Image (spheres, coloured by chain):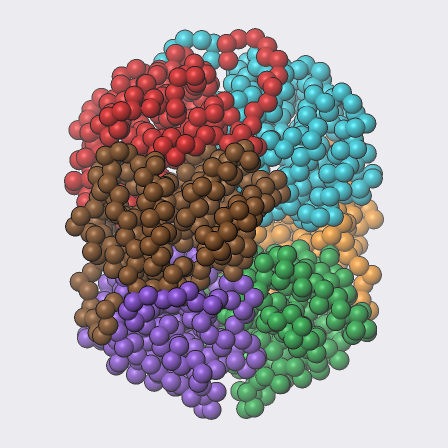
Chain colours: A cyan, B red, C brown, D purple, E green, F orange
Amino acid sequence: MRIGIVNPNTTESMTDEMVQAARAVADSDTELVGVTAEHGPATIEGYIEDLEGASAVVDMARNLSSDIDALVIGCFGDTGILAARELLDVPVVGAAEASFMAALTVGHRFSVLTTLDSGVPLLEDLVDAYGHTGRCASVRATGVSVAAGHGDREATRTAYLDAGRKALSDDGADVLCLGCAALPDIRDDLEDELGAPVIDAVPSAVVLAEAVVRLGLRTSKIRAFKGHTPSPTVGGPS
Amino acid sequence: MRIGIVNPNTTESMTDEMVQAARAVADSDTELVGVTAEHGPATIEGYIEDLEGASAVVDMARNLSSDIDALVIGCFGDTGILAARELLDVPVVGAAEASFMAALTVGHRFSVLTTLDSGVPLLEDLVDAYGHTGRCASVRATGVSVAAGHGDREATRTAYLDAGRKALSDDGADVLCLGCAALPDIRDDLEDELGAPVIDAVPSAVVLAEAVVRLGLRTSKIRAFKGHTPSPTVGGPS
Amino acid sequence: MRIGIVNPNTTESMTDEMVQAARAVADSDTELVGVTAEHGPATIEGYIEDLEGASAVVDMARNLSSDIDALVIGCFGDTGILAARELLDVPVVGAAEASFMAALTVGHRFSVLTTLDSGVPLLEDLVDAYGHTGRCASVRATGVSVAAGHGDREATRTAYLDAGRKALSDDGADVLCLGCAALPDIRDDLEDELGAPVIDAVPSAVVLAEAVVRLGLRTSKIRAFKGHTPSPTVGGPS
Amino acid sequence: MRIGIVNPNTTESMTDEMVQAARAVADSDTELVGVTAEHGPATIEGYIEDLEGASAVVDMARNLSSDIDALVIGCFGDTGILAARELLDVPVVGAAEASFMAALTVGHRFSVLTTLDSGVPLLEDLVDAYGHTGRCASVRATGVSVAAGHGDREATRTAYLDAGRKALSDDGADVLCLGCAALPDIRDDLEDELGAPVIDAVPSAVVLAEAVVRLGLRTSKIRAFKGHTPSPTVGGPS
Amino acid sequence: MRIGIVNPNTTESMTDEMVQAARAVADSDTELVGVTAEHGPATIEGYIEDLEGASAVVDMARNLSSDIDALVIGCFGDTGILAARELLDVPVVGAAEASFMAALTVGHRFSVLTTLDSGVPLLEDLVDAYGHTGRCASVRATGVSVAAGHGDREATRTAYLDAGRKALSDDGADVLCLGCAALPDIRDDLEDELGAPVIDAVPSAVVLAEAVVRLGLRTSKIRAFKGHTPSPTVGGPS
Amino acid sequence: MRIGIVNPNTTESMTDEMVQAARAVADSDTELVGVTAEHGPATIEGYIEDLEGASAVVDMARNLSSDIDALVIGCFGDTGILAARELLDVPVVGAAEASFMAALTVGHRFSVLTTLDSGVPLLEDLVDAYGHTGRCASVRATGVSVAAGHGDREATRTAYLDAGRKALSDDGADVLCLGCAALPDIRDDLEDELGAPVIDAVPSAVVLAEAVVRLGLRTSKIRAFKGHTPSPTVGGPS
């Protein structure tokens, strides 16, 4: 089976890290096709960048569509997931969506550890939209931006440890989701030090996508994701 | 005061209709600046078109930003509203958001009358995201696409009357929202025939935007709409 | 257009302050008619006083009904709003309701700053009833009663600043609502010092009422606010 | 023990019926003190009448306060219940509140059968406010006004049977609440014919009040129902 | 009337304490039949023990069924309550369910004080399932296990006082529920020291059961609790 | 990897069917260990049978614990799932839980098709407890009991087709979950005839369990599923 992993930002090294982390858990027969956005922002940390990333997701999904068995959105905002479901017949799985599902099979209440305080509302809204309001203990910002997180790994590690510890002791969480798509080595550290399961987003999405493909499922075209004969389009590349 | 009305689709005649309908209710001192998307779909009736429209909204908002006192999203999906809030300091008001607010000042439970069945989930999710789940009686599809609605006005009128009647008698609504941004003449007919208030979306957003401007309010830059130094962007126009 | 502003308590100076604050933002063509309750409590800070105020609202609304285009409830509890909607054909807008709506067009999550701790539950219930549970960061008491608030303005200002600061930093709010109908000068101070939009209640309700009147809307008489041939009434003035 | 039953409307025959129905189930040592509103409407079927009734409830509660061990609100809208709790130290139990509690001890989802369609929203809001949204199958209007219900008992009985049957078969209810305070003889008929438990409101409230009194509980004066030194009051009897 | 109180754990002294506490508030004509589980754990502080207790509840309910007018589940987890309702025609009342109902008649928001932190999620889920999410201020662990609670009464008392004080001052509660079925003497101390009503679970359930029996209600057999001709059973005693 | 599939009822042929259906989708390297309850009911269609099945699940889980990498609850009620999570360190996945997760990756709103009307409330409560209230279009009974479903396959097929068709056309579903653990051949028929994805429960749980095992996750022992030194147990086999 072939699973496309689309990274909505234009930072290729992050795509590589995602694919590598997913490779470590995917079935050996699964081929992982990492694709990096050709246009848009270097990281996605706001609503505008999210839109730009979503536009890139649609483009990447269109290119991949004939070749893949499932698509994974490689970004914790599940950027462009509904549009991708409308576009494709194969299943589409989001990194956040899959993280929450994995978290709820091994814990009772999860917390999300994310980057900046300004990104918390977007994730809180995502948690609500997925129906997990009652099972989410908190969304905690570490104060580490995506770029910084890839710069100083030790400071990042400390910030995530600190936020994770508070989520477990103060917020009532018993499982943690890493709300950033590329922190593979931090996951193991957190799990070891905190003694709670820690969910890495893209790997979760990949194994969930494998599961859905094995079930023979395809995206429903009955109503929400039906699509329609596209309206004539004017102008630019989108 | 100058209010920008951005139409996320590329159909200029719809922009004209919106501005005309809004003109009829706006303060005489308010200048309305209608802008039509330069790229994207002719109508927005799905998630991909919604994304394309949102991208156009950001572009239009960026062009308008130094010249306006408020921005109105001229589309019932409130396409791109959060990105526009992140971008702008002036208030941003959505057509659906304003319709729901107006509806709830004159009725107890509203129904939305929209185009096709496949568009219902997107609007139901919007209602939920705005917190109106408990005050929304139903989202009803009329079966009339945007294009068709502008073609055969009589059939459109009949379909909306029929859906509106059912919303009032079967679903428990006492006020109706027209979930399509350009049906001005139908509003009066429905109100006359059904005896219930009927909300036209863009005019509602324009008068609400006027209200918020008069209050001297600006979009909060404290957290969700803070924005940040944009990441370096790669490639195309978006 | 003529908008009635009914103050459910008997303190005429508060009515004057409300009208003055609203005057500063209303359209110059709008006539504002402030009316003070002729019977009932000097301030409304509990359920019994709320009922007494609501009874006064009905009386004032009945007197005003033939002369106004919209009614504004000049009290953050939206005292008597449903009864006024049942009574009148013109739109009725509540000060809290309008504050929440204004807040949600310029922020993502609001906090309410109110007087005493004992009044918090009533406002929390109001927030819930309006469907804003998920968008309300907190209702915070300042510890300053209505009477005290009009006495020592400096202490009041400090208490509101302190509560507002905590709402923004600890509770996740990015916009503040002043949960007391007569604190106009404090609004500007808070906005300046805290850097977040601050909503003054009665002015918000007046501009929202103007907006709804411009839309030509009238209160729905289909179901909840239908009224009926009144039952024979026995005894007293009510 | 002495329990006051306050009827917020001025129809003394309804008070008599309530007391009689409650007498049949109350402990033989419990004294029931029925009080009829001295001012206000003959029946309560709208928001204004509800307010007038609430005002009467406060007056009656004030008169009774030194003599009773608990107060029962004898009206399915739980008219004035929060004000009465603020006023009194003894427990206050509402007829609707108690009906829902009784219903949920013997069934899984309840429906409310009430009078006119226009009264449904008020009861739906009450169900929501009490947190029973998920356990309430429906609020169904019988089309029989309070006055009519006391006129033609046979037509009333038929209308309630019909509504109850639909609630059980179409809405998923397995227990019914009579949403009108004075239909004692109909309760037994419905239970016999429909084979489901049927809850009569005032008797439920009386036995629940007995229970709370036996537990030695008093209304909490910690926060919501604290009251405060009343503001000076101006004018009329309220 | 005869009310069975089933203690799902095997500790007979706890049954005796429950019956004694209930005896103090029950009608003098009510006969209380305390029954202790013949198999299962000494205390119930986890999901497995809850299941074992539920199995014992079914056995005890089956034995009692021909002799009682109502059944009370003598454990704050309401262990086995739905199964008991399916089994019996008489009403079944849970200790937690009744506590919440009593709490909501005398306060606006309740907190639950329970034993260990690990038991909090089960109670939070129970609160949610009963629809009281919005009226529950907190579930607080005292850190005192059931066994310890019956050992050192003074330390237990201090721990409950401390947790109760925080619930009232920090969490917004105005009434407290004791989330453990056998702490009768602590209830009075808490109420005296904290000045808020404190609900003792089993006594609440007994007086509520008395109330429901007086109303002549029986468990609905229409849908959820219908039962069916049992499937053939294989093996052991269950 | 070894996955245990515990069938909480005593019908071995159903276990065989589950394992066979799961075998068709599981990884070829995964060993599936089907275990049938040694005591308890032949089918689980009520609360008492659910309890008995849960007790059997704990026994089976205890026996399997040292030998498996994950446990699947082979019953749509997710019988005993929380107790199994408390007991085991390896992940535990429920058939209903996994069905809902799979459904939400390929559709927007799901309906559950189940056996008898009396079983609908238990499943509605499960949907609510998992947070999917807003994404569940309906739970529909087919009227076919488990036993009947395994008897006359043609009548069963017709009943499921009919219920599925109504769920898609009347209730707004775009994906269906088979709420009974052993209807493998019906799944394909429904999918072909209705054109919507149809989720088979146990296979979904098995592939989700594989996914979670690949992620290296273990059940969190931080709070809800911590367990504790068991209390001394008295009596029988449970």
Measured from the top left, where is residue D58 in percent x and y?
A: 37, 72
Visible in this render: residue F145? Answer: no
Measured from the top left, where is residue B78 in percent x and y?
A: 41, 29
Q: Is residue B31 left or right of residue A52?
A: left
Visible in this render: residue B193? Answer: yes
Q: Quadrant of the N terminus of chain C?
A: top left
The residue drawn where x is 30% and y is 71% is D237
Q: From this view, report whether residue D14 is shown above or below residue A153.
A: below
Q: Nearer the viewer, residue B29 or E43?
A: B29
Measured from the top left, where is residue B113 in percent x and y?
A: 30, 36
The residue drawn where x is 38% and y is 85% is D33
Q: From this view, report whether residue A36 is shown above or below residue F74.
A: above
The residue drawn where x is 48% and y is 42% is C186
Q: Is residue B76 left or right of residue A170?
A: left
Q: Is residue A165 left or right of residue F119?
A: right
Q: From this view, report whether residue B110 is shown above or below residue E195.
A: above
Question: Where on the picture, by quarter, is residue B212?
Answer: top left
The residue drawn where x is 37% and y is 63% is C41
Question: Where on the picture, by quarter, is residue B40?
Answer: top left
Measured from the top left, where is residue B37 in percent x and y?
A: 38, 15
Q: Quadrant of the C terminus of chain C?
A: bottom left
Say how many tags the image has.
Answer: 0
